[in-house]
Image: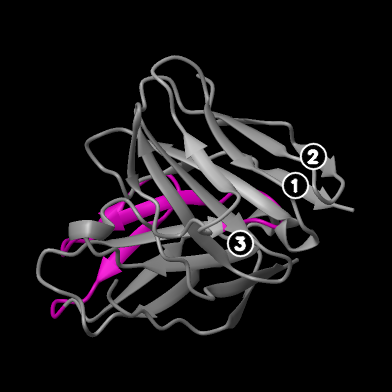
């Protein structure tokens, strides 16, 4: 009974590089959410996706960030041209369709931009 | 989301019950109360949720007042591993469906 899986767990990128964070939801869950936790700050919602659809991206920065959840494969959060301010823990969560607020979180990806 | 208010920190002795309060006086009639916790550096963990009846699961109990303006999360026998930040969340549906808004929460420290 695998939970939400995220990889890599730690990612180091230099300024200007691209970061790709992957999330495999709980088996059978079709709803995925991404949250970001900046150092010493709270968790902030970024985006809510269902298979092949973005439902709510109100928390996504307008530039450089994108997310997808294809029909097959994991959800991907992509950050282009990373800057030091992108250094944070990125958490993915998933839920079934019946209760979108009962979300199960992965262990997170710690992104460090040098 | 309906605004929630929690004490910033609480202490509890190991083996005793931990009672974590939350005020949500602006809650609407069809809004649920959700509780999550985040143990240091880990992903948040869903604990329990309820509408108006008291709820219990293997992790905790949730007591919601009759007027629904406040609730209490009860960990019946706290252990050191329960030390975490606990979040009380009242999500709003509509266009924000699925979005959880985490506030500052309550830092619970369980002492030996």
Of badges 3 and 1, nearer the viewer stands 1
Q: Quadrant location of residue B90?
A: bottom left
Q: Which chain carries label 1?
A: A
**Callout 2 environment at 10 Å: few (<14), some (14 to 19), or many (20+)?**
few
B78 or B103: nearer the viewer: B103
Q: Mark 1 points at which residue?
A: A110
Question: For residue A109, what is the image quadrant?
Answer: top right
Residue occupying the point 50% across, 58% down: A62
B42, above or below A94, in the image: below
Q: Which residue appears at 59% of the width and 68% of the height?
A: A42
Q: Position of residue B3 (x, y in %)?
A: 33, 80
Residue B89 pos. (x, y %): 37, 66
Q: Which of B105 and B108 is in front in this view?
A: B105
Left or right placement of residue A107 versus residue A55 in this view: right
Residue B20, image x, y percentages: 46, 74
The residue marked by circle 3 belongs to what chain?
Answer: B
Q: Which of the two labelled residues, at mark 1 and mark 2, occupies the earlier sequence position? A: 2
Q: Give the range drawn in magenta.
A: B38-67
Which quarter of the figure has residue B6? bottom left
Looking at this view, name the residue that lies furthest to the left. Answer: B29
Instruction: Specify few, some or many for label 1: CA neighbours under 10 Å numbering under 14, 14-19, or 20 or more.
Output: many
Q: Would you say residue A104 sits in the magenta stretch?
A: no
Above or below B92: residue A114:
above
Per the image, the residue denoted by label 3 is: B15
Q: Name the residue under label 2.
A: A10
């Amino acid at each position: 009974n695998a939970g939400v899986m995220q990889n890599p767990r730690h990612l180091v990128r230099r300024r200007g590089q691209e970061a790709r964070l992957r999330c495999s939801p709980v088996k059978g869950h079709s709803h995925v959410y991404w949250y970001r936790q900046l150092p010493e700050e709270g968790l902030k919602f970024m985006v809510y996706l269902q298979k092949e659809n973005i439902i709510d991206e109100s928390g996504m920065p307008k530039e450089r960030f994108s997310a997808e959840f294809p029909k097959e494969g994991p959800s991907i959060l992509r950050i282009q041209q990373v800057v030091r301010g992108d250094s944070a823990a990125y958490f993915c969560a998933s839920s079934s369709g019946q209760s979108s607020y009962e979300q199960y979180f992965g262990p997170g990806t710690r992104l460090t931009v040098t | 989301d309906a605004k929630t208010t929690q004490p910033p920190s609480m202490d509890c002795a190991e083996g005793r019950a931990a009672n974590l309060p939350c005020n949500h006086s602006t809650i609407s009639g069809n809004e649920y109360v959700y509780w999550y916790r985040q143990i240091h550096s880990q992903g948040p963990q869903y604990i329990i949720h309820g509408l108006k009846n008291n709820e219990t699961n293997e992790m905790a109990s949730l007591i919601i007042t009759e007027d629904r303006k406040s609730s209490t999360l009860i960990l019946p026998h706290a252990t050191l591993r329960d030390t975490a930040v606990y979040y009380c969340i009242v999500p709003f549906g509509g266009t924000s469906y699925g979005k959880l808004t985490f506030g500052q929460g309550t830092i619970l420290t369980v002492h030996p």
